[in-house]
Every structure is written in structure tokens, then in C-alpha cells.
Image: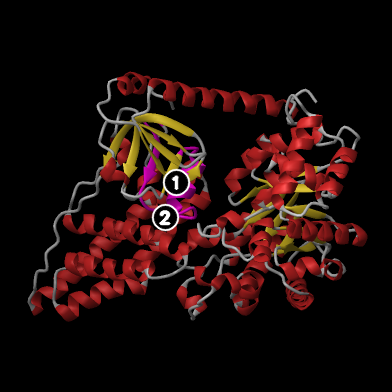
């Protein structure tokens, strides 16, 4: 991943060192020479056609469409074999876009009604669709522009008969820099020579970002004017951890980044020495460490890092991959069954659909929301669109017969919502009984605690739910009335805010009193410093990104519960998040002068 020529080249570069900030979407560090990708299709002109030429032009477009479908189906099969069915389904969805009425029929309509050539009609429809997606406030829908662009470019290439070249033809180690990359571009990357990439556009949930992460390829997105500020062959460092792009680094900087890679790899090896040991404090308090995943393919990472099950499986990716269509019951079932069988005898907690209202296909939602964060999302959305929800729930019930599955519902704000969804589950169980289809009759049903109202009445909800999972990302946002992606108020995003800690403690205490398990699956659960106070507050189940598990395990094995309890008790008397953080840091430094994480503990 680290290219020797880069070091030599950096010393003789004529340009100054520059650092650009973006969003790290795939962790890792890559060093190499820049290759600027500029996409150009042949010029498209509006050519009027006569009445008698319309049929021929329609047929020419339909032939290009069929060729595009064949290419996408072939690509889907190749990606499924090499990366897994969930990634392959991205291109299955692309093939569906090609045949969608809003895509193909509009092109045909323009050809016939305006009597223009297919290329012009195709280009016009592409621009209309992209403008429509870009007009949405919702990030997820805006990111679907790349999928429309990918499909449209393929059709145009087939219409124009242009020879297609892909990025895998590059034969030397490079960093790809582009205004945008489509999913088709990304899956064609060879592990070498392309060692990393950065783009001007894109989002965390774009298919390109998801594929990059699955390929373990360092990637940074959202760097403004990237391709205008960097030249071909300049030395570039992609830091997927920090979300930065460094241009023309000095030899000393390159050496430091090379050392960072070595230190990261060495730390990972050391941490994994405790992989098979129990996460138990020195005074023998047992802590369960589980993984958050969104793809079946991530199971190997969960196993590698010693997860004791899956504490949160985000089911949204299946919907994303099938967009603009909805997944069928069988597609749901096969995925959940695979999870259950692979994890047995450990548990897998599957969270039902949890995208905001506007992240569904427009024809499913049928309405626009001014404030989706406080609108139709999570469980409330699913209960409104019950046909979609019933499909997922039936599949979950059926899959529960093949392993240990728990169902978890997001954004529950009160008891009535929980009772309604439990009634729906009972109805579906009765349907399966009549059909003679097996399921786990003792299937556990739990809820996310991420709305302040749910945290406040956790004692009541605990009498209705089988388990809780505290989702700190949303709980912090809703409790403190801040959007952490808004730079004007992001400084107020404080996980150690006294109000948040009181809510968390109340949920943990309510769970213990009712005898139900309580876990935490937000980002707070993966921070070593926060782990100290969470253990002290009585949290026994943590769920996090798989790679964070060894770090938190070593924290657990380094501490005593009674010490964490004392730290938590004093921290709860502090008045600000800053005071709490300073106290925890001071306490940790006093008790662990050689560092909190000790691989020999």
C-alpha cells in the first residue's frame, strides 16, 4: 500500500505542502502518485429526425438498453462472486433503474414526441432525474445521483459505440482523485495498483463509499475542488482515519505516516492477543462486547476481533442496495437466515428499517417532510407503511428458526407504539402458524432508547420490552437539541453532558430492576475513556464497530469495577461535561500512569 517512489519524488517536488479536509469513509492510510480522473463522453447534439426515422431510433435506444442490462447483470454476478450478494445487488438495482418507467419510458417519449435522436433524449432525461434527486433535502436521496449517473453513462456509451476503458487498466501504484466515482468505477479497482482514492462529491451512505470500505481501500470524500488543486503525478497521502488529503508531503511526513501504519498494525496484533479471553474486570465483573455491522460480509471482522455476537445489525443496506425498489420477503429472509446460521450459538440483534421518511422511494412515501428528523422515521414510518414492514417482520420471524435472532425497533417514544408493534408481530406469528412455517416462539423483542421520552419512562417500557439498546448518537442529539453535522452548534455535542449521563443511568437502572439486558450501541460505547464511566454506571453490554472491540476489551481487563463505580459516582456530581471529562482523565492518569490499555492485563 505504501509506494517507495513516493518518498523519492516528495524530496524533489516543485510545489508546496498542502492539506485538504474531507470525510473519511474508509479507514487506512495510502501513499502514492496522483492520477486525476476526468470523465468525458462524446459531444451530444440535438438531431431532429423524420417521422419514418422514429421507429429506428426507438429500436436503437432499446438495443442499447438491453446491452446495458446485460452488462449490469454480468457485473452483478461478478461482484457477487468476489464480494458477496449484498454488493452485487447494487448493480441488480442499477439494472432495475434501466427498466424503470421514470427512466426508459421518458426517453422513448422524448424520441417519439419531440422527434429527436436517442442520445439527446437520454441526456435530457438524465439531467432531469439528477436535478430531481439533487433538489431533495435528504442526504440519502441526493447520494442516489451517482447511481442514476452510472446507469445513464452506460446507456450513452452503448448508444455511441464508444470503447469502454476502466480504471483497472492502470498498471502502477496510484491514488485516484476524481470529482466523483460511480459504483461501477469502484468495483473495478484492483487492490494494487490503485491504493486509495479521494473525491469531491459523495456521502457516507453512497454505494461508492460502502464498496470502498468493503475493499479495505482508504478513501476520503467531500474535498471541494480537489481535481482543480492537485496535479497528476504529485505525491498524495490519503488518511481515511482523519479524512485528510496531504499533497507533496516531506520525507519526514511520509516517514511519520509509514510509522503510523506500522504502529497501527503492531497495536492491532498486540490487542488481538486477548481475542479469546473474557472481557472481565480485575474484580471479576463480566462485560459482553458485541459488534455493530450492516453487511453480512462484516461478520468475518466481528469474528476476527472477538465479538460475542452482533449487538446491532443495521438492516437499511438491503433497502439501499435494492433502491429504487423494495426488497422482497425472500431477499430479507435469505440475508437474516445467513446471519443467524453464521452466528449460532451467539445472538444477532437485528434492527428493523431505520431510515428517515424521505429516504424511502418517493412512490412509497408519497409526501414531503419539512423536518424529517422529527418526522416520519424509524418505527413510526414502518407502522404507517405496514405492507413494507410486514414483509420484513415475516422474514425475521422465519429466520429466527435457524439461529438466535432478536428483533429491535428504533425510535420508540412511548408504550403505545411498542404495544402496537407487538400486536402486529403476534398477528404475523398467527399467519405463520396457519401456513405451517416455523419460527422461534420465544423470539425476543427489544427497543432502541434514543428518544428522551423513552429514557424518562424506561421503567415503564421495561415491563413491555425484552431488552434495551441505548442509541447515544440520537439520544444526545435529541436531548441537547443539536445537530452535530451543523458546524454552528456541533461544539455542543457532548456525550458526557450531565443530562445525558443521568438519562443513561436511569435506563440502566430500569433495566436491572426489571431483569432485562441493557446494551449501548452508539459511538459512545467504543470510546475507551467513556468506557470507564459506563462500566461504573453499571452497563454490562457494549456494541461497537468490530475493530474497536479489542481496545475496549483491554480497557475492561485493565480496570476494577469498584474503581469505575467510584469514578462514576463522583462524575455524576459534576456540573459540566468539561468538568466530568477532566475528572475522568485525571482519575485514569492517577490509576494507570503507564496507560489505560495494557495488553498483559
Please tell me how many numbered marks the rendered image carries: 2
Helix, strand or loop at label 1? It is: helix
Image-based side of 38 in relation to 69, left or right: left
Compared to 183, does 238 lie above or below? Answer: above
Quarter of the picture containing the N terminus is top left
Task: Give 195 or 430, whichever is nearer the viewer.
Answer: 195
Is residue 320 within the magenta segment? no
Is residue 216 within the magenta segment? yes
Task: Give 483 or 259, whichever is nearer the viewer.
Answer: 483
Report the residue at 72% width, 42% height from top. Answer: 582
Picture coordinates of residue 517 (x, y %)?
84, 55
Residue denoted by label 2: 91
Task: Give 87 or 421, whichever is nearer the viewer.
Answer: 421
| Highlighted magenta segment, given as a residue range | 192-218
Image-based side of 163 in relation to 489, left or right: left
Which corner quadrant of the image does residue 381 belong to? Answer: bottom right
Residue denoted by label 1: 79
Report the residue at 28% width, 75% height from top. Answer: 106
Pointer 2 local density, CA inside 10 Å: few below 14, some 14–19, many at least 20: many
Q: CA distance from mark 1 to mark 2?
A: 9 Å
User: Do labels 1 and 2 touch, CB within 8 Å?
Assistant: yes
Image-based side of 36 in relation to 376, left or right: left
Picture coordinates of residue 441 (x, y %)?
82, 64
Q: Which disc number belongs to residue 448?
A: none
Quarter of the picture containing the C terminus is top right
Amino acid at each position: 500500500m505504501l509506494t517507495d517512489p513516493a518518498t523519492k519524488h516528495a524530496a524533489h517536488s516543485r510545489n508546496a505542502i498542502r492539506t485538504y479536509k474531507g470525510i473519511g469513509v474508509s479507514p487506512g492510510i495510502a501513499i502514492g502518485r496522483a492520477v486525476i480522473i476526468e470523465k468525458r463522453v462524446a459531444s451530444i447534439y440535438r438531431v431532429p429526425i423524420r417521422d419514418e426515422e422514429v421507429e429506428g431510433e426507438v429500436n436503437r435506444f432499446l438495443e442499447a438498453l438491453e446491452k446495458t442490462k446485460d452488462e449490469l447483470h454480468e457485473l452483478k454476478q461478478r461482484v457477487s462472486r468476489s464480494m458477496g450478494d449484498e454488493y452485487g445487488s447494487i448493480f441488480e438495482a442499477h439494472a432495475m433503474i434501466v427498466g424503470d418507467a421514470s427512466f426508459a419510458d421518458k426517453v422513448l417519449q422524448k424520441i417519439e414526441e419531440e422527434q429527436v435522436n436517442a442520445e439527446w433524449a437520454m441526456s435530457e432525461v438524465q439531467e432531469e432525474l439528477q436535478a430531481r434527486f439533487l433538489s431533495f433535502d435528504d442526504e440519502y436521496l441526493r447520494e442516489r445521483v451517482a447511481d442514476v449517473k452510472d446507469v445513464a453513462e452506460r446507456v450513452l456509451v452503448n448508444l455511441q459505440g464508444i470503447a469502454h476503458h476502466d480504471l483497472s487498466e492502470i498498471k502502477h501504484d496510484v491514488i485516484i482523485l476524481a470529482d466523483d466515482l460511480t459504483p461501477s468505477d469502484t468495483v473495478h479497482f484492483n487492490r494494487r495498483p490503485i491504493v486509495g482514492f479521494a473525491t469531491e462529491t459523495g456521502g457516507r451512505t453512497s454505494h461508492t463509499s460502502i464498496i470502498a470500505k468493503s475493499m479495505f481501500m482508504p478513501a476520503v470524500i467531500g474535498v471541494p475542488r480537489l481535481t482543480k488543486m492537485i496535479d497528476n503525478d504529485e505525491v498524495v497521502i490519503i488518511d481515511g482515519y482523519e479524512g485528510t488529503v496531504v499533497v507533496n508531503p516531506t520525507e519526514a511526513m511520509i516517514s511519520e505516516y509509514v510509522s503510523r501504519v506500522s504502529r497501527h498494525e503492531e497495536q492491532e496484533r498486540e490487542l488481538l492477543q486477548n481475542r479469546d479471553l473474557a472481557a472481565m474486570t480485575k474484580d471479576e465483573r463480566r462485560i459482553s462486547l458485541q459488534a455493530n455491522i450492516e453487511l453480512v460480509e462484516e461478520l468475518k471482522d466481528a469474528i476476527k476481533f472477538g465479538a460475542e455476537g452482533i449487538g446491532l445489525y443495521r438492516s437499511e443496506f438491503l433497502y439501499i442496495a435494492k433502491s429504487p425498489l423494495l426488497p422482497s420477503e425472500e431477499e430479507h429472509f435469505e440475508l437474516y437466515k445467513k446471519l443467524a446460521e453464521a452466528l449460532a450459538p451467539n445472538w444477532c440483534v437485528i434492527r428493523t428499517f431505520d431510515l428517515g421518511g424521505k429516504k424511502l422511494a418517493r412512490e412509497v412515501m408519497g409526501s414531503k417532510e419539512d423536518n424529517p428528523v422529527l418526522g416520519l422515521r424509524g418505527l413510526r414510518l414502518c407502522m404507517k407503511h405496514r405492507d413494507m414492514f410486514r414483509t420484513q417482520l415475516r422474514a425475521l420471524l422465519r429466520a429466527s428458526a435457524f439461529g438466535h435472532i432478536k428483533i429491535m425497533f428504533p425510535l420508540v417514544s412511548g408504550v403505545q407504539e411498542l404495544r402496537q408493534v407487538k400486536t402486529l408481530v403476534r398477528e404475523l406469528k398467527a399467519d405463520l402458524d396457519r401456513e405451517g412455517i416455523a419460527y422461534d416462539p420465544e423470539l425476543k423483542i427489544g427497543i432502541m432508547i434514543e428518544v428522551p421520552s423513552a429514557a424518562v419512562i424506561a421503567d415503564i417500557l421495561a415491563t413491555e420490552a425484552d431488552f434495551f439498546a441505548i442509541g447515544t448518537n440520537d439520544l444526545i442529539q435529541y436531548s441537547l437539541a443539536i445537530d452535530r453535522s451543523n458546524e454552528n452548534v456541533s461544539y455542543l455535542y457532548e456525550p458526557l453532558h450531565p443530562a445525558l449521563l443521568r438519562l443513561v443511568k436511569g435506563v440502566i437502572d430500569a433495566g436491572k430492576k426489571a431483569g432485562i439486558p441493557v446494551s449501548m450501541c452508539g459511538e459512545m460505547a467504543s470510546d475507551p475513556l467513556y468506557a470507564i464511566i459506563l462500566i461504573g454506571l453499571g452497563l454490562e453490554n457494549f456494541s461497537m464497530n468490530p475493530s474497536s472491540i479489542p481496545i475496549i476489551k483491554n480497557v475492561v481487563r485493565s480496570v476494577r469495577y469498584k474503581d469505575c463505580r467510584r469514578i462514576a459516582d463522583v462524575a455524576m456530581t459534576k456540573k459540566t461535561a468539561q468538568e466530568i471529562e477532566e475528572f475522568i482523565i485525571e482519575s485514569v492518569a492517577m490509576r494507570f500512569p503507564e496507560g489505560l490499555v495494557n495488553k498483559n492485563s
